Image: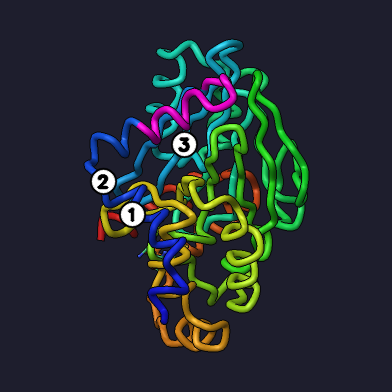
C-alpha cells in the first residue's frame, strides 16, 4: 500500500539516484548549466572547522556574481577564487544570523568595491540590503527568489534560482536532517511548515544545497528529502518531539558569532582572540 502511494516519487528518485552515476552527473550538469539556455558559473566551497558550505554563483555573460554564506576565515580564498574567475562580486547573501561561525560579508565589504551584504529584514541584523519573502535579486542574467523559511531562526531565508532548478536552504533543511530549533527564536512547528510549504513544494528535481553538512554529503533533491529525510517525513507532532529530544550542545562560538553576525560580521580584536582560543581547545 505504502509502496503504491510512494511509487511516483520512488520512480523519480530512482531516475535520479538509481542509475549509473555517470548518467546522473551528466544530466544534473546540463540542468545547472544550460536550462533555458541561461548558463551559470557555480562553485560549492567548504569550511572544514565548522562544516559550512559557501556558494559562489556567477553570470558567465556579464561576470556579475554573488556569494552565499561566506565565512570570515575563508575570505582570502573566496576573493582569490572570484578574482581568478574574473567575477565581480555584487552581493554577499546570508541565509540567516549564524550561531557557529562569523559571516564573511563584513570582511568582503572591506576588500571589494561595490560589494553589498544582504540578509532578511526579519533577522534584525545590520546589512546593506534587506530582503523579504517574494523579493528577487539579480546578477547579470540570473534571478534569485527569496523565500522566508523561519524555524531554525526567525529570519531564515531560502534562496531559489528557478532557471537552474536550485535552492540554497541555509540551515532550514540539511541533507537527511534540518537545523536545530532551540535558540535564536527557533521554532520546530515553523521549521516544519517552512520545509513543507516553501521547499517541498518546489519541483521534485530541484537540487537543494544546504548551509552545512556533518556527514560528508554535498547536495540533495526535493524528491530525495521528501522520501528519505528522517525528520521531515515524520508527522508534525512527532517532529516537534524529535527536535525537543535532540539535546545538542550549543555551538562553541555562539557567544561570539551571534553578536558579530548581527553587525554584519564586525568582530572586535578581543572576540577574535577569544574565538581562536575556543577553537584551539
Ligand atoms: N558542533 C557545532 C555546532 C553544530 C550545530 O549545532 N549545528 C547547527 C547548525 S549551526 S547553528 C544545527 O542546526 N545542527 C543540526 C543537527 O542536527 O546537527 C559547533 O560547536 O559549532
Spatial CA span between label 1 and label 2: 7 Å
Which residue is drawn at the image coordinates 62% and 78% (left, top)?
Answer: 189
Image quadrant containing the N terminus: bottom left
The C terminus, quarter of image: bottom left
Any mark on residue 65, and which? none
Residue 216 in picture, x, y percent from top left: 26, 53
The numbered mark at residue 19 is 2
Is residue 32 highlighted in magenta? yes
Position of 253 with respect to 19 (left or right) is: right
- Is the residue 79 above or below the residue 210 in the image? above
The reply to whether callout 1 and callout 2 are in contact (CB within 8 Å) is yes
Q: Which residues are magenta?
A: 27-39
Q: Residue at 57% of width from left, 23% of height from top? A: 65
* Foreground pick, 31 / 212: 31
Mark-to-mark CA distance, 3 and 1: 27 Å
Q: Which residue is mark 3?
A: 55
* 74 relative to 200, above or below: above
Q: Can you give x and y, in whole percent of width and height, for residue 158 in the image?
A: 61, 51
Amino acid at each position: 500500500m505504502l509502496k503504491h502511494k510512494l511509487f511516483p516519487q520512488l520512480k523519480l528518485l530512482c531516475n535520479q539516484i538509481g542509475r549509473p552515476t555517470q548518467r546522473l552527473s551528466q544530466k544534473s550538469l546540463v540542468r545547472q548549466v544550460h536550462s533555458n539556455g541561461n548558463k551559470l558559473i557555480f562553485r560549492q566551497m567548504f569550511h572544514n572547522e565548522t562544516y559550512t558550505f559557501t556558494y559562489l554563483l556567477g553570470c558567465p555573460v556579464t561576470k556579475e556574481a554573488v556569494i552565499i554564506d561566506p565565512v570570515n576565515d575563508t575570505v582570502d580564498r573566496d576573493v582569490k577564487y572570484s578574482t581568478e574567475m574574473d567575477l565581480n562580486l555584487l552581493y554577499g547573501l546570508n541565509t540567516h544570523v549564524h550561531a557557529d561561525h562569523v559571516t564573511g560579508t563584513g570582511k568582503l565589504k572591506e576588500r571589494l568595491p561595490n560589494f553589498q551584504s544582504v540578509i532578511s529584514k526579519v533577522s534584525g541584523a545590520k546589512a546593506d540590503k534587506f530582503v523579504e519573502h517574494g523579493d528577487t535579486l539579480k546578477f547579470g542574467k540570473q534571478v534569485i527568489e527569496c523565500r522566508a523559511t523561519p524555524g531554525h531562526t526567525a529570519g531564515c531565508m531560502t534562496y531559489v534560482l528557478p532557471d537552474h532548478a536550485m535552492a540554497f536552504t541555509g540551515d532550514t533543511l540539511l541533507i537527511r536532517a534540518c537545523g536545530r530549533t532551540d535558540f535564536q527564536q527557533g521554532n520546530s512547528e515553523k521549521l516544519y511548515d517552512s520545509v513543507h510549504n516553501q521547499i517541498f513544494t518546489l519541483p521534485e528535481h530541484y537540487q537543494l544545497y544546504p548551509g552545512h553538512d556533518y556527514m560528508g554529503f554535498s547536495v540533495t533533491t526535493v524528491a530525495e528529502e521528501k522520501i528519505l529525510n528522517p525528520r521531515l517525513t515524520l508527522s508534525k507532532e512527532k517532529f516537534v518531539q524529535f527536535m525537543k529530544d535532540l539535546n545538542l550542545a550549543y555551538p562553541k562560538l555562539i557567544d561570539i558569532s551571534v553578536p558579530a553576525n548581527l553587525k554584519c560580521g564586525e568582530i572586535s580584536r578581543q572576540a577574535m582572540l577569544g574565538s581562536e582560543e575556543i577553537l584551539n581547545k
